[in-house]
Amino acid sequence: MILLQLRALKSVFTQRMSDFIPFHITELSAQEQMASDEQLLTSELKRSVLSVYQWKEAAITGGRGTSEEQLQKLGEEKGISNISKRRTGGGIVCHQAQRGLTYALAIPRLTLSEIGSIHHFYQTLHEKIQVLLENHGVACSLAENGKSTPADPCFTHPVPADILSKSGRKIAGAGVWVNKKGFLVQGEIQPEEPVDWDLSQLDFASSWLE
């Protein structure tokens, strides 16, 4: 059953992937950037779109289950006023300035019945990001268990299929949002050490077509 679901998932990607917005350093505020990510998922979208970027200034974003009070409190603790909520799920993420990677992936007309489950999609996505990290010399693996809440800050608790460093720290995760237009993923990749990213490899969505 799982094999059939993964084949169906690959078929969906093959039919719809992908336009790639070249890597860039965003100068938008957190609120503006989250709105920009959401706009990738429009009724006119015919092909999937992947945007990969870094932040010019540090920012904090929280998934849809996060309260404004939680974001404000963490922002005050860390001295960061550039904060915003996200449409996607997941906990609170501290985005470092010009380090790591943030991405948004919009897939039109994708339904849960086509991919089998959110978990299968999430695992397939992170398997590809794991390859990206390993190609950059980052030893990592997928988490087999774990649990977090919307109030958890900055990658403190992994969930199954998150990416872990060799030391066991969560270094990549994502949140999802599904509506009638399609499927939006917003993710974060934060290796423990700085990485000199090979820009030619950042369109990791294209590897799903192999």
Image: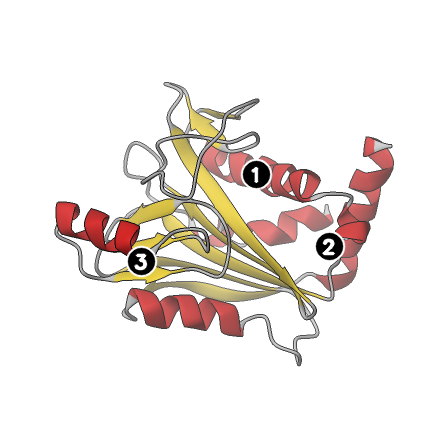
Is the image coloured rainbow, by chain, by secondary structure, or in one colour? secondary structure
Q: Which mark is residue 126?
A: 1
Q: Is residue 49 left or right of residue 98?
A: right
Measured from the top left, where is residue 48 in percent x and y?
A: 65, 65
Using the image as rendered, state which of residue 87 and residue 110 is in the foreground.
87
Q: Residues within 10 Å of mark 1 (few under 14, many from 20)?
A: many
Would residue 42 be seen by someone viewing this image from the given angle? Answer: yes
The residue at 29%/49% (across/down) is 70
Using the image as rendered, state which of residue 19 and residue 90 is in the foreground.
90
Measured from the top left, where is residue 117 in percent x and y?
A: 73, 43
Residue located farthest toward the bottom when viewing the structure as drawn: 44
Find disc 2 in the rendering and name its residue.
Answer: 13
Q: Which mark is residue 68?
A: 3
Measured from the top left, where is residue 201 in percent x and y?
A: 50, 49
- Marks 2, 3: nearer the viewer: 3
Q: Residues within 10 Å of mark 3 (few under 14, many from 20)?
A: few
**Of the residues under marks 1 and 3, which one precedes in the sequence?**
3
Measured from the top left, where is residue 65 in percent x and y?
A: 45, 51
Q: Secondary structure at mark 2?
A: helix
Q: Is 38 situated above or below 190?
A: below
